[in-house]
Amino acid sequence: MSPRLRKVLEDMAERIIPSGGPDYPGARDVHLADQVIEMIQSFPGAMRGFRAALMLWELSPLFLSFQFRTFSRLSPEGQNHYLESWEKSRFFFRRAALTGLKGLFMVRFYGDARVHEKIGYREGCLQPLEQVVPPWSPEEEGR
């Protein structure tokens, strides 16, 4: 991934899950951009589409909000404002695209051991069943 697109991904992650908070780590603290890139690379052919989507995010302020800066060149406040405009947009595509990106970030963020520690999640808190119990069985039909 090019440094420019990596910066777009890092900036978006930082806007959605800010670092430096008193209670929780943030996107930069857990290297969220690296984790998302690793996850996308595990799907054959997905990286090309993901890079195209990031380039769309990078260039979209020029065309959709008539700002004279790309996303990565906006101030942090400008980036927040721009992402909020997508979140509140009347166009489904914009809202859905941002929701999908947030989902990618959240899957990796809450899967990180440092976040587990902060929220009190313990590995193995759900134990596997010794025997699989079907949700319905013919014996129960007569009851």
Image (tube, rainbow, N blue to C red):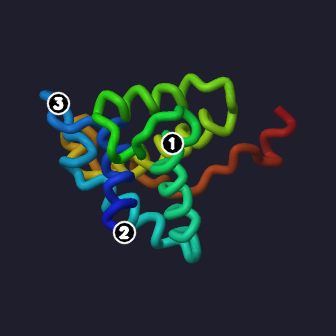
Would residue 83 be visible to someone looking at this image? yes
**Picture residue at 56% right of the left edge, 23% below the top:** 88
Mark 3, Cα crowd under 10 Å, few <14 / some 14-19 / many 20+, is few
Asked which secondary structure carries label 2, the reply is loop
Q: Is residue 51 left or right of residue 16?
A: right
Residue 21 is situated, as x and y percent measured from the top left of the image, at 17, 30
Residue 55 is situated, as x and y percent measured from the top left of the image, at 49, 57
Which label was assigned to residue 2? 2
Q: In the rendered structure, which amino acid carries the disc numbered 3?
A: Gly
Is residue 51 positioned above or below 16 on the image?
below
Q: Which badge, 2 or 3, is on the more N-terminal residue?
A: 2
* Label 1 – label 3 distance at C-alpha: 31 Å
Q: Quadrant of the N terminus?
A: bottom left
Residue 37 is situated, as x and y percent measured from the top left of the image, at 39, 64
Is residue 108 positioned above or below 92 on the image?
below
Which label was assigned to residue 62? 1
Q: In the rendered structure, which amino acid carries the disc numbered 1?
A: Leu
Q: Image quarter for residue 52?
A: bottom right
Q: In the rendered structure, which amino acid carries the disc numbered 2?
A: Ser
- Name the front one of labels 1 and 2: 1
Q: Which badge, 1 or 2, is on the more N-terminal residue?
A: 2
Dot 3 corresponds to which residue?
A: 21
Q: Quadrant of the C terminus?
A: top right
